[in-house]
Amino acid sequence: MAADELFHRFGREFPRGTVLFREGEPGAEMYVVHQGKVAISKRAGGVEKVLTTLGQGQFLGEMSILNHAPRSATATCVEDCRLLVVDARTFEAMVRGNAEVALRMIQTLAARLAEADEQIENLLLRDARARVVHSLAALAERDAREGGGARLELSADELGARLGIEVDKVHEVLDSLVKARLLELAPHSLVVPEPGRLRHFLDFLELQSGAEGAA
């Protein structure tokens, strides 16, 4: 089924700022991003933290209709969005009738588990610089073109919200990475020319932090 036909059948438009669902609420629908961006956030220590931002072709809210559990996070449109809204019965029919849909679901869930592991590893880092560099390195390694760099559609504000770090501190770290030629700033994105060099720099920061802790 063509994308336009899918949107005609299941699509809805949501203005920026719309909360699609909140953490803890029951859920009977999942969403596929046709256009725009949706932030996924969760409360931790009394603070709302952005875990990730989803764009075109990505889906959200599927766990509630798969296991009938309450929403595990909050989803908010950070841009005007056009979304496919799919209920449990329709989703089940899609998976049963289309192996490509089922495979894509498995791949996405596996990627989200890997991202969760990266976030846990990041939280173990005490130094804000190391947390920013770790996040950028992990994203760049996942999205890098073969033998090349990576362009991350991510702003300093989004990165700070995701990591729970003040935006001023994020900008400070990004500026230092630009000066070291480990990062390039582009409109609405961050470019990592060589993800391997960023990972080596992270290793240096962790060694430095360990040495300072032992002093």
Image (cartoon, helix red, strand yellow):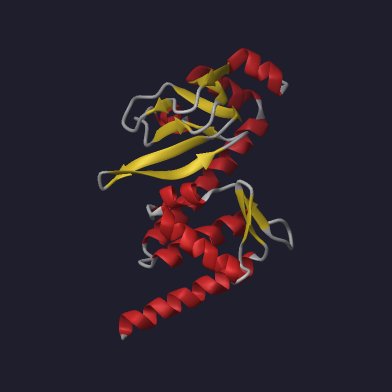
Residue 70, placed above or below residue 42: above
- Where is the C terminus found, in terms of image quarters? bottom left
Q: Residue at x 62, y 64 (%)?
A: 195
**168 or 100: nearer the eye?**
168
Q: Toward which corner of the image does residue 130 lie, by quadrant?
A: bottom left
Furthest residue toward bottom:
215
**90 or 185: nearer the eye?**
185
Is 187 on the left or on the right of 74, as rendered?
right
Q: Residue at x 32, y 84 (%)?
A: 214
Q: x, y percentage for residue 9?
A: 62, 13
**120 or 81: nearer the eye?**
81
Q: Residue at x 51, y 71 (%)?
A: 202
Residue 62, placed above or below residue 9: below
Is there any visible trace of residue 133 in the rendered image?
A: no
Q: x, y percentage for residue 145?
A: 71, 56
Q: x, y percentage for residue 141?
A: 61, 59
- Where is the N terminus found, in terms of image quarters? top right
Q: x, y percentage for residue 175?
A: 53, 64
Is there any visible trace of residue 145 in the rendered image?
A: yes
Is 27 on the left or on the right of 152, as rendered?
left
